[in-house]
Image: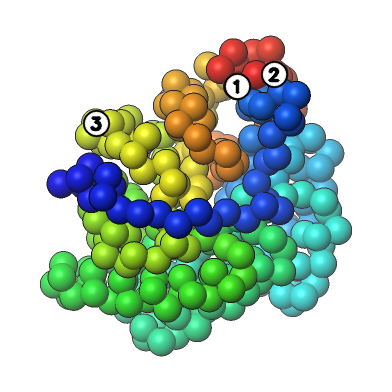
């Protein structure tokens, strides 16, 4: 059913030029290192300013912003720091909660998301990550209706700010606090119901690895992929050792995705590590000569 929807759906071209890596005409593909972004969730204990300085010093080209870090300062000050850093912004986390599970009303969730999208426009973010919120006592159909209504409204705001919305899929048990969308197919069906060019999807290769049917959809849904989130990273001296799903990252790249691969790691072990050492190891493992499909 989902594959049929994707084949029938006409997706308008929608991209943000300022936060998408630019292919070199003489070398049309990019190295993996050119495509790595580090979410501020991964560098949990760094402040906004520390994370920006740390990524620049570590040779990382892009940052995934976290609204908690943004709100530690006045929005204008946060925006100025991001712009002055010269880093690209792969995405901003996290808008949503349209089902009322976090004690916010629907209108309050829309207002908060609107502010985050407008901030994204100021810093030329490529996407804003969106989680629908769990069912929270609603029927599945009502939760879907609330989310579709929200995405249509916010899609207009995103479009006027040159941003895409990246709707997240999560598996249980983590999803219970965040979203009722537990599979790629259910997320794609909801996006299709929106019929809005600014509404896309976040994909996580680790999730696709477990959702076997999703592997066959990568090529068909490539125009809908607004962000790629990497949630699993291991230690190692090569990209293959570092990223357990490197082959799926390559598949997404080869299908036509030109955005960043954003490392968003929820791990106490990573949070307690030396972030500068982690970035150095990442850079060394992702040198252009290491992963052949990316150079």
Colour setting: rainbow
- Dot 1 and dot 3 residues touching (CB under 8 Å): no
Inter-mark Cα distance, 1 to 2: 7 Å
Secondary structure beneath disc 3? helix
Residue 106 vs residue 148, the one in the foreground: 148
Q: Please state which of the two labelled residues, at mark 1 or mark 3, is closer to the viewer.
A: 1
Inter-mark Cα distance, 2 to 3: 30 Å
Secondary structure beneath disc 2? loop
Residue that numbered label 2 is attached to: 288
- The tag on residue 294 is 1
Q: Is residue 234 above or below residue 10?
A: above
Q: Is residue 199 above or below residue 151?
A: above
Q: Is residue 187 above or below residue 148?
A: above
- Residue for point 80% across, 60% down: 83
Within 10 angstroms of label 2, few (less than 14), some, or many (20 or more) residues? some
Inter-mark Cα distance, 1 to 3: 24 Å
Mark 1 / mark 3, whichever is N-terminal: 3
Residue that numbered label 3 is attached to: 212
**In the visual, does 83 lie left or right of 221?**
right
- Dot 1 and dot 2 residues touching (CB under 8 Å): yes
Q: Can I make out residue 168 in this image? A: no
- Residue for point 82% across, 67% down: 80
Within 10 angstroms of label 1, few (less than 14), some, or many (20 or more) residues? many
Mark 1 / mark 2, whichever is N-terminal: 2
- Residue for point 41% across, 87% down: 107
Residue 201 vs residue 175, the one in the foreground: 201
Counting from the top left corner in percent of width and height, residue 205 is at: 41, 34
Mark 2 / mark 3, whichever is N-terminal: 3
**In the visual, does 73 lie left or right of 120?**
right
Q: Is residue 129 above or below residue 246?
A: below
- Residue for point 64% across, 36% down: 36
């Amino acid at each position: 059913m989902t594959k049929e929807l994707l084949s029938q759906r006409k997706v308008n071209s929608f991209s943000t030029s300022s936060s998408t890596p630019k292919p070199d005409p003489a070398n049309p593909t990019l190295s993996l290192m050119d495509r790595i972004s580090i979410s501020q969730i991964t560098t949990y204990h760094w402040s906004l300013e520390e994370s920006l300085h740390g990524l620049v010093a570590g040779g990382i080209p892009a940052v995934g912003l976290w609204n908690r870090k943004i709100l530690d300062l006045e929005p204008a000050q946060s925006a100025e720091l991001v712009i002055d850093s010269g880093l690209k912004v792969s995405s901003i986390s996290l808008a949503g909660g349209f089902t009322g599970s976090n004690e916010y009303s629907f209108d309050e969730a829309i207002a908060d998301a609107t502010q985050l999208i407008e901030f994204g426009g100021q810093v030329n973010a490529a996407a804003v990550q969106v989680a629908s919120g769990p069912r929270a006592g609603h029927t599945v159909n009502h939760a879907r209706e609330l989310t579709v209504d929200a995405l249509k409204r916010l899609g207009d705001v995103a479009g006027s700010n040159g941003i895409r919305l990246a709707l997240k899929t999560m598996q249980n048990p983590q999803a219970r606090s965040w979203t009722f969308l537990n599979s790629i197919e259910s997320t794609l069906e909801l996006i299709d119901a929106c019929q809005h060019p600014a509404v896309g999807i976040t994909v996580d290769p680790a999730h696709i690895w477990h959702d076997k049917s999703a592997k066959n959809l990568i090529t068909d849904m490539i125009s809908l992929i607004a962000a790629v989130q990497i949630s699993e990273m291991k230690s190692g001296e090569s990209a293959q050792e570092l990223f357990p799903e490197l082959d799926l990252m390559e598949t997404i790249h080869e299908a036509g995705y030109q955005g960043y691969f954003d490392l968003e790691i929820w791990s106490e072990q990573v949070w307690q590590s030396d972030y500068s050492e982690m970035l150095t190891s990442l850079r060394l493992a992702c040198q252009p000569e290491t992963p052949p499909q990316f150079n």
